[in-house]
Structure formats: structure tokens, C-alpha cells
Image (spheres, coloured by chain):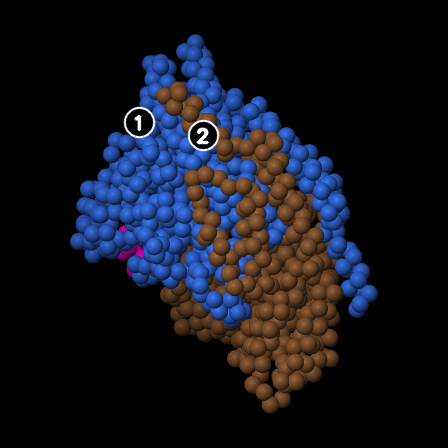
Chain colours: A brown, B blue
């Protein structure tokens, strides 16, 4: 047996490259990444390719290894080039992403040291770091002591965790699902609908609350619908508002909705994945300062703090309710229960073992301080206002509502033409041009174009470029 | 407005360090990480501290930034040192983690380039890479074409996704929950119970299926219970087996259970988060080769492929069922629906935007090839057998069942002493000694110690060290 062990150990040793081999691998990756970053200004925001990365299949996983240089070449050709470049300031579609540099170092260090941030006993420091990040976010929205939360992979799991917490807090078991009513506008993010389904609430009635002309929830209609449902013997149990809708950037009147929901004993959740961090800016609309009135709030650091993808967050006003909905015991975890000094993330999340997400957030916030994040968010709001203003100068532009945050809706309506067809053409041409990347949506039955500013690399020159692209296409349309 | 924009842009520019600043930050982190790796041999697997990382609170997030050197010092003292070191080969508790080096480079590159792997239109190459990884795992367990899956943050979300898929595939709506029966042994991982709750199935009856003396599910008892429930007007809808239990490393008889479940039209799910990748070895027990008979299987690359935490995986035999349970449309995603060439992860997962998990898996598999993973897994099995054999030589050791995979149960039962108290003392002393880290569990009402070998850095010398520690403590116990 001893010689078999020695033999296997030697074969497995490939998995542990020594310092020189690590340097070789690291130098290759680091210099590739530096080239990527230094070349960002000249890269397109969207690249159309015929192959769409199909070449990856020509390099199957096999028994023996390959050289890092060959892998990086394949990576570049098949993954880095085709499609959308979310690291680009020209990404002005959906809700743009970011990827500030220190987070990549945080992920690197987290992967090497592999701290287990799920349970206090296993890594008290890693757990404290995650809890400090939750507390910092609770502070910026104004949650009291006693609030809790969870660092998630993104808004979807954070919203799911909120909905499960609401379901448990309000005692909605399977028997009560069909009479437990959920309220939201049709502009709520689709991950909320998805989460409702995952949480086993598919048969719960979902009411579409009316919106004002700026796509914001009407609290009066909410109150009326809740009261009517109550009279009909139903249980209004959950209201979901948006702290910045994805489609139009509208901010629901959080404070008023909170009063309506509270008076009717419903859980009030706000999906502020997109807009929540604007609370750091003086420009934020009032309702963003009222997030603390909600029972739970979702924020996405991979949106509003410009982190690379993989960082959402849930905050819950009463940590105990999050805990009750998500804790679970096991025999083989018995050693871990000795210490109760600090809440363990695994007791406040659908996850147990997971990526240590605290470090990629803590490191940039500590290195840079909050000030530049604040400034960058303000800049995004002003860039959107700037774009909106400049759009007025382009002929036959129909504009959506004044941007409250950093999303702007617009459509080109040249007289005598089918506007939907024109705008469908425009977005296709913008996307294949690729210098900037915008997206489109359907609102009130019409096809609208959207500009969303949240990439930290988007600056005035980027917005000017977007305006140039749009102007040129509008001119072309006029000549056709 | 122009000067305001220029001013904000300049304040925000701190978020974009230039090449020289990046090098400064990177050099500090890289040299810290190298020191960590080079010192691993001499580090304890568990470090008891009084402070438990409390000093992190002395360094709050503030408006201005801090130096990387100060942050790394704080990190080391408060996060890296206290508690368990999962990067250590001496981590022999719970299910050990790993952290092979190329994954850290994968995470680094993923964070910088920030590809969005959720939707094919956005990043066709990143999506293909994730799909190739799913397909590779489907191949190694023997799933047919038409299988699908998802790269998750870990086993918990993967199991949740499987349970939601089963619930939808079997049409268990809220009205049917109370008569839809779930079957598992009491050794199933607790994240399955947690996922059942999250999925709104808390009122579904859960039957504890009998186990043989080696903690493996008894298919006959399963069949009997299912038939009895059917006769009683209930719907047996889900059977959950384990491809390596956490507590004892037992592998349920997958093939036989599959036949029982299939004959009764129930969904058959296997949580093989711990043991699934042993399918790569010639030593794997037969049931691990029968995983392809299940409707869905969970594997954890952050366990069996030695990746850093943050990588689980779900495989589903019929991709279409996973898709039906998790897809969802939205207006603002309309541009993304043009291309249907390749399945999009966001349609097969509770998540939408998330960490690009494909690269941290693809890079090490490509760089090293499969051979060293295979050898390393075999080594883990043989190390456990070696440990088990050597335990026989220590007086008054009661041994659990022959290890099927890489978990070994044992307890010290010196005559005339309270064995539970003795073993509680032993585990405390092993953990405060810290040279190796073992855990304990309660099985059949008794306190057992566990050795689990799955860290890729665990070799014969590590197991010898564990034996030395145990021998010394047993001697001490004999003298007391």
C-alpha cells in the first residue's frame, strides 16, 4: 500500500505547481490581463463574430494538460472577443456591469487562501468581514441595529431569500398560498417572478399595481387593491417595489408604499439591486432615502459599486426573521455550534459552502474609500441628464420621462414611418456598430431604446460617442 | 454641467488605477499569497485565537482609502490566521476543501474581463465554456445527450435547483404539497432539508428510509414505504439518495434505488456533492458508476475537483425539464432572445447575473489534464484505507464501517470510561492542537470522530501526522 500511495502522490503532484511554475502561469495571465485593460479604450463594446466562440469545442478536456499560452489564445479568440464587453465604458445596455481592479485581487487571494466564510467557528475573521460588509450597507440605507443580511451571487438569489423570509415571517404555508396575495407593478424585475415560482408561491395571486406616467407604483391603487382583497377574504402578504426599475429607471414611492403595506400588515420588499447605492449621492431621489422603511432590500454591489459579476446583497430589517427562515442544524456540524458570538452567514442564506464574497467588496472599499464611489455614482446620474438634454437636439426624438437615476428611454419617430420598425433597425445597427452598446425594450406597446449609465468606465466622452452614433444613424434614416 | 461632469470624473478616477498602481497593488497581494503558499507546510490546520478577528472592526470603511500594506496586515492577523485553514492538507474535517492554484488565476481573469455568462447573446464564448463544463461532467457520469445542468455556488443551490425541477416536473403545486411524499435516509445532507423548505415543500411528508449497518439506504424499505403511501392515497414524488454521505461517506445503492423510484414514477435525485467525482477512479464503488440512472445529480467541483469554494454543479438527465422549471422572459431582455443556438445558463438556474464560474473550472482541467485529478482522488481513497488499517493498531479503538470512499468513523472506547465524554475531550484536544483538524458527529446516539480525506494537499505524511496526534492523545488518556 505504501508504494501505491507514493506513486499516486507523485502523479497528483501536478496539481501543486511549485513557485517557479506558479510564476510562469501567473505572468502569462497577468500580462494578458494588463494588455486587456490597456487596450480597453480601443475595444468595441460589442463584437459580432460568425464563430461565436464555437472553437472552444475543438479543445476538449483530455487526460494530459496544455500550455497556458495555448489556453489564453483560445480564451481570447473564443471568449474575450465575441459579444458584449461588460468591462467597457461603452456598455450602456441592460444594467451595465463593471469590474474594479481590486476585486480581482480579492478573488485571487480568496481562492488561494480558501477561507470558509459560512460558519463563525470555521473562519471567524472571514465571517466578521462579511458581517461588516452587511452592516456597512445597512448603515448607508439607514437600517437600525438588529438588521441583518447576506452577500449573494447577485440580485436573483437575494430576492429569492427575501421572498422566502417574507413567506416564513407571514406564515404562508402551502395551504395558504392560494389566498396570499403579492403586489407589484408590471415593471418589477423578472427575477422576482422567478423567485416567487422557486419559493413555491406560483399559485399566489399576483396583482399588478397601477403606475403613474413615469412608471412608478401608485400607492393609492395599492391600498385599494389590498383592501379589496382583504374584503374578499384574501391575505395581502407581500408588496414588492423597485428602487430603480430595470426598464425605465423609475423609483417607486418607497415611503408611501411602506405606510400602505405596514398598515395592512404585509411584508414590504424593495428590489433596489440597480438603484440602491445611489443613496450615497446627493442627487438620489427622495424614495431612495426611504429604503430603511422596507422590511427587506436588495442591493447589487456588482451594479452600483462597480464590482465584477458575482456580488448581490440582501438586507433584512429584522435579522431574526432571516435567521428563522434559513437556519438548519446537522449532526456533523456539531463542533461549529459552540460559538454564538457572531451570526454565521450559512444561517442567513440558502447557501452553505460558497465563494468568500466579502473580500472582493471589502478590499476596494478599504483601498479607495467611499468618496470615489460616491463621485462615480453622481457622475452617472449627471451623464444621463446630459444625454437626455442632448437628445432634445436630435430631430424627431420622442423622449421617455426625465431620468430619475441613470436610465433614459427614447425612440426615433420620423414622420410617415413605422416607428417600431425604425427603432428595431436602429438598435440592430447600434449593436453591430459596436462602439457603444445600447439595448431596447417594449413599454406601453411600443419599441423604445434605452441608455443605462452604470459602468464606472463610462464618462462624458463615452456618452458623446453614443450621441454621435445615434445622430449618424438618424441622419442615415432620414436619407433612406 | 460640463464642468460638473469633469469634476466628478476626476474624483471617480481613483476607481481606475493606472498600470503602475495596479502593479503596486498586485505585487503586494501576489507576494503575500506566495508567502502563504510557501509557508503552508508549517502552518496549523486550525488556529485558536482569543481575538477571533475582532480587530476588523477597528478598521471601518471611511471616506478615504488606505494602503494595501495595512490592509494585508489586517487581513493576515484577523482573517488568515484565526480558525480553520482549508488550504491546508491537515484539513481532515467535514468535507475538506482545496484551492488549486489555476482557479485563482481564473477568478482573477474572470473579474477583470467580467464576461457575462448568463445569456448566449451577451457572451457566446463564456456560455459555451460553462456548457462544455456541464457536458464534461455529464459525460463522466454517463448521462446521455439531452442532459443539461448548471454551475452553482455550491451544493446547496444545486440541490435546491434539482428539487425545484423535480417539483415542477411532477406537477407538485401548493395544493398537492401535503400529499406529495419525499424519501431520504436520515443521513442525507441537511442542505436537502433546507432546500425542501425554500422550495415551499415544508408540509410535504418526508419519510426516513431505513439504512443497513453501513448507513446505506435499504431499497426494499423504500419500495415498501412508497407502496404504502400510494395505497394511502399519497403521491410518492421524490427520492433523494446520497453519493457519499457527509457523516460516514456511505454510498446509497443508486442502481437499485433508481429502479424502485422509476417503477413508481418518482423523481430520483442523488446528492453526490461529496462523492460524485470519485467516478473518475477505478476504486469507486459500483453505485457511483450508476449515477447516470438518476434524474438529477449534484457534484461539487469545490470538493472533488479541489477547486476553491464557490463551485457546485447540478446535472439533469433531461435538460428540457430544468429549462421549463427555470426559464422566464422579460421585456428588457428582448434583444437576447434572437439567438437560440446554445442554451443560456440563466434559463437553467435560479440565478441570472452571477460570477462567471466556468473559467475557474476550465482552466485547471485544461492546464493539468484529467490524469492528476484521477490520481489525486485515488490517493484520497487509499489514504483513508491506510488510516483505517493503522487505527486497528491503536488500543481500544472502535471503528466505523470499512470506508467506501474517503470518510472514516472511529471512537476511542477505553474500558471503564464514559466513551462519549472521552471522544468529546479527544476532538477538543485535536482541534486545539491544530496540526491536523478533524471533526466529530453523532451516529446512532454515540459521539464519533471523523477523518475525511479530500484536500488535495493531504498525503501520507499528513495522515501519519494525524495518527501521531491521535496516538499521543490516546496515551495521555490512558495515563489520566
Residue at horizontal 28 percent and vertical 37 percent from the top: B286
Residue found farthest to the top: B479
Residue at horizontal 47 percent and vertical 21 percent from the top: B461
Q: Categorize mark 1 by other alpha carbons within 10 Å: few (<14), some (14-19), many (20+).
A: some
Residue stretch rendered in magenta on the structure: B176-181
Disc 2: which chain? A
Which disc, if any, is residue B402? 1
Which disc, if any, is residue A131? none
Is residue B178 covered in magenta? yes
Dot 2: what SS?
A: helix
Q: Is residue B362 above or below residue B36?
A: below
Q: Quadrant of the C terminus of chain B?
A: top left
Q: Quadrant of the N terminus of chain B?
A: bottom right
Tell me, yes or no, if residue B160 can be seen here: no
Residue at horizontal 76 percent and vertical 47 percent from the top: B64
Identify the residue under disc 2: A11
Camera-near label (2 vs 1) is: 2
Q: Residue A75 at what x, y percent from top left?
A: 55, 51
Q: Residue A467 at what x, y percent from top left?
A: 70, 72
The one nearer the camera, B233 or B450, is B450
Q: Categorize mark 2 by other alpha carbons within 10 Å: few (<14), some (14-19), many (20+).
A: some
Amino acid at each position: 500500500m505504501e508504494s501505491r500511495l507514493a506513486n499516486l502522490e507523485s502523479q497528483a503532484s501536478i496539481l501543486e505547481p511549485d513557485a517557479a511554475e506558479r510564476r510562469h502561469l501567473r505572468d502569462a495571465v497577468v500580462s494578458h490581463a494588463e494588455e486587456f485593460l490597456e487596450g480597453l479604450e480601443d475595444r468595441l463594446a460589442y463584437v459580432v463574430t460568425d464563430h461565436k466562440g464555437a472553437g472552444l469545442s475543438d479543445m476538449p478536456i483530455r487526460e494530459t494538460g496544455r500550455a497556458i499560452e495555448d489556453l489564453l489564445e483560445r480564451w481570447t479568440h473564443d471568449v474575450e472577443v465575441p459579444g458584449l464587453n461588460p468591462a467597457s465604458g461603452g456598455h450602456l445596455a441592460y444594467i451595465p456591469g463593471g469590474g474594479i481592479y481590486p476585486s480581482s485581487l480579492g478573488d485571487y487571494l480568496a481562492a488561494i487562501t480558501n477561507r470558509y466564510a459560512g460558519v463563525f467557528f470555521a473562519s471567524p475573521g472571514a465571517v466578521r468581514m462579511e458581517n461588516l460588509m452587511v452592516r456597512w450597507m445597512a448603515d448607508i440605507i439607514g437600517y437600525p441595529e438588529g438588521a441583518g443580511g447576506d452577500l449573494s451571487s447577485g440580485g436573483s438569489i437575494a430576492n429569492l431569500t427575501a421572498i422566502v423570509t417574507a413567506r416564513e415571517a407571514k406564515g404562508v404555508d402551502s395551504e395558504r398560498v392560494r389566498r396570499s396575495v403579492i403586489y407589484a407593478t408590471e415593471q418589477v424585475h423578472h427575477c422576482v417572478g422567478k423567485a416567487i415560482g422557486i419559493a413555491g408561491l406560483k399559485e399566489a395571486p399576483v396583482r399588478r399595481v397601477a403606475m403613474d406616467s413615469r412608471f412608478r407604483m401608485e400607492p393609492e391603487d395599492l391600498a385599494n387593491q389590498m383592501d379589496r382583497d382583504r374584503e374578499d377574504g384574501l391575505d395581502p402578504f407581500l408588496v414588492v417595489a423597485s428602487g430603480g426599475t430595470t426598464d425605465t429607471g423609475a423609483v417607486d414611492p418607497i415611503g408611501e408604499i411602506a405606510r400602505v403595506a405596514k398598515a395592512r400588515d404585509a411584508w414590504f420588499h424593495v428590489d433596489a439591486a440597480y438603484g440602491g447605492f445611489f443613496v450615497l449621492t446627493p442627487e438620489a431621489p427622495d424614495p431612495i432615502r426611504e429604503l430603511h422603511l422596507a422590511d427587506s432590500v436588495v442591493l447589487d454591489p456588482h451594479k452600483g459599486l462597480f464590482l465584477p459579476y458575482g456580488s448581490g446583497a440582501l438586507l433584512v430589517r429584522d435579522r431574526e426573521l432571516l435567521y428563522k427562515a434559513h437556519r438548519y442544524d446537522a449532526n456533523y456540524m456539531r463542533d461549529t455550534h459552540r460559538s454564538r458570538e457572531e451570526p454565521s452567514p450559512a444561517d442567513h442564506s440558502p447557501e452553505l459552502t460558497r465563494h468568500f464574497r466579502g473580500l472582493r467588496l471589502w478590499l476596494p472599499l478599504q483601498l479607495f474609500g467611499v468618496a470615489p464611489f460616491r463621485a462615480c455614482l453622481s457622475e452617472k446620474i449627471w451623464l444621463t441628464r446630459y444625454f437626455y438634454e442632448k437628445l432634445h437636439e436630435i430631430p424627431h426624438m420622442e423622449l421617455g420621462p426625465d431620468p430619475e437615476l441613470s436610465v433614459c428611454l427614447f425612440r426615433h419617430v420620423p414622420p410617415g414611418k413605422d416607428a417600431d420598425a425604425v427603432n428595431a433597425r436602429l438598435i440592430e445597427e447600434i449593436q453591430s456598430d459596436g462602439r457603444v452598446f445600447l439595448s431596447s425594450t417594449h413599454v406601453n406597446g411600443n419599441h423604445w431604446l434605452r441608455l443605462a449609465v452604470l459602468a464606472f468606465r463610462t464618462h462624458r466622452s463615452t456618452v458623446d460617442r453614443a450621441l454621435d452614433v445615434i445622430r449618424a444613424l438618424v441622419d442615415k434614416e432620414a436619407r433612406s
